Structures are given as structure tokens and as C-alpha cells.
Image (cartoon, helix red, strand yellow):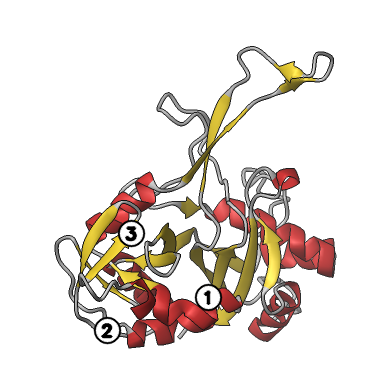
Amino acid sequence: MKKHLLTLYTRTPLHVGSGTSVEVVDLPIMRERITGFPVIPGTSLKGVLRQECVDHCGPDAACRLFGNETAERDKEKHKAGCVICSDARLLAFPVRSLAGCFAWITCPVALERFKRDSGHQFSVPPITGERVIAGKSLRIESTRQVVLEEYALESAEGNLGSIVEALKPLCGESVWADTLADRLALATDELFQHFVSTTTEVTTRIKINPSTRTAEEGALFNQEDVPSEALFYALLVLHPERARNGSGWTIEDVINHLTKVLTQDTLLQVGGDETTGHGFCSVRLTEAK
């Protein structure tokens, strides 16, 4: 069994919906029940990867990697794949910044979970209260503050070098690789939770009646999206193919076929509203530590 890390960097707003809601937002995004952080369910991610495999390697390889599409209750026909796909967790979230245009905000909980899942080792500086440890382009030196969204936060001392070193190889986008050290901000878990709950994109949409060219009555709704420039990661656990005659794929075969599907910085569409340009993500596959 081997573990690989799949990272997804949102190039366009992402909507993986949780269905309709009675809250303020009609179509909210999926969130973790405990933390409230945005999440991409493993079922959604596995479906996207399976279709990508069908397109590049054919249906037979897709069946062997990700299993067939027969319902699990049909034990005679159901076949499990060689790839186990976890939910994609949020690691860095973009927010507006008065200095430096925007920041990638993260928190100790997100980083510690990433360390546990990926095997990376780095130190997370302690942070408390309404303070952030931020890259130099975010800091306003005259007031020793970092202004994120509408909040003026105290700039705290701390070294993010080891975090940047661990996170930088996860994405090949130049905006990430070239500016992560300057834009990264470490906040408390509570501040991070607040930002990811209140600063997602919410757009209002309507349905046009083609005959009258006007909005249909009762067709006004709003939709929540994860903004562009967010970073998620998922864990892929690979194991040899289970074959009765002993001729199944080895771990090396599984890795070779998976890397054919997920070439360096593959562009995938995840979630809803594909035809309106939502959900395009740069994807990178790396071996976990």
C-alpha cells in the first residue's frame, strides 16, 4: 500500500453543493460538519478522476483503478478499484488584503491535519488572539498591522519558512510558487473558521424566459462558491489489484497508470456549473512522505 497526495488549486470559483437550504444562501457549498471548513467529498473527486481515466486510458483501466459503476449492493458484479480517495480538505484560503492585493490564510488545525495526512514535517509557530503571522507583502510596517477583508489585525512575529517550504511544491501555478512566501498568513483556528465561513463568493442568478427575454417569476436564487486561488488536498491510498488468478496490477502498475491520467499540473473540472466556467482546478500528484 502506498499513499499519494493530490492537490487541487482552484483557477475559477468552485461549487460543490450540499443541496438546497432554508438559510440565507439558496445553494450553499459542502462543509465539514465539525469545523465548518469547505470540503470536496471523496465521492465527487473520485467520479472526476474516474472520468478522466476513461478519457485518457479507456474504460478497462478506469474500472481497474477506480472500480466499476455497479452498485455495491450487487455483490456479484461489483468490483473495487485500486485507488482509495479521501475527501479534499482546505489548506489555504484566499482573502482580500489592503497590502499585497490578497493573502492565503491558513491555521494550525489545517496545517496539523496536513502534516498527519501527508507525512510532511514542519513547525507551526504559536498564534493567539486577533493576530496573524504574515508574509512581508501583507504587512503594513508603519502600523504593524495586517488588514484582511475589513479586519485590522496585529502583525505577530514568527517564522513561516518551513511551512512555505512544505507547501510550495504542492502547486505549479506561478502565482502560488512565486509569491507564497510573501502572501501566506497564519491565523488562529477561530479566525480562519470565520474567514472561510463569511468570505466565500455569493452570486445572485436568474432564469431568463426565452420567449419574453425577461426573468422568470420565482426563478431568482443565489449560490455560494469557493473563490479562485484556494488550495485543497486529498489523500489517495493505492494498493495492488485484487485478482483471483494472480495476474492483477502491482502497485507500480497502478502508479504508472495513475500518473498517465494525472500528468504534471493537470487541469480538471470539479463540481457544478461546468458550462459557466466554474470548478476548473490545477491538479498535482505527489508521493506522500
Residue beneath disc 1: 176
Q: Quadrant of residue 261?
A: bottom right
Amino acid on which the number 3 mark rests in the picture: Leu
The correct choice, above or below, for 48 with respect to 254 in the image is above
- Residue 126: % across, % down: 18, 75
| SS label for mark 1 | helix
Mark 2 vs mark 1, foreground winner is 1
For label 1, the crowd category at 10 Å Cα-Cα, with few meaning under 14, some 14 to 19 and many 20 or more, is many
Amino acid on which the number 1 mark rests in the picture: Trp
Dot 3 or dot 2, earlier in sequence: 2
Q: Is residue 92 left or right of residue 283?
A: left
- Image point (75%, 44%), residue name: 275
Residue beneath disc 3: 148
Q: Is residue 35 visible?
A: no
Q: Is residue 74 left or right of residue 6?
A: right
Q: Is residue 265 left or right of residue 222?
A: right
| SS label for mark 2 | loop
For label 3, the crowd category at 10 Å Cα-Cα, with few meaning under 14, some 14 to 19 and many 20 or more, is many
The one of 210 and 240 positioned closer to us in this rendering: 210
The correct choice, above or below, for 87 with respect to 36 in the image is below
- Disc 3 versus disc 2: distance between alpha carbons? 24 Å
- Residue 150: % across, % down: 31, 51
- Image point (84%, 15%), residue name: 211
Dot 3 or dot 1, earlier in sequence: 3
The one of 163 and 142 positioned closer to us in this rendering: 142
Residue beneath disc 2: 123
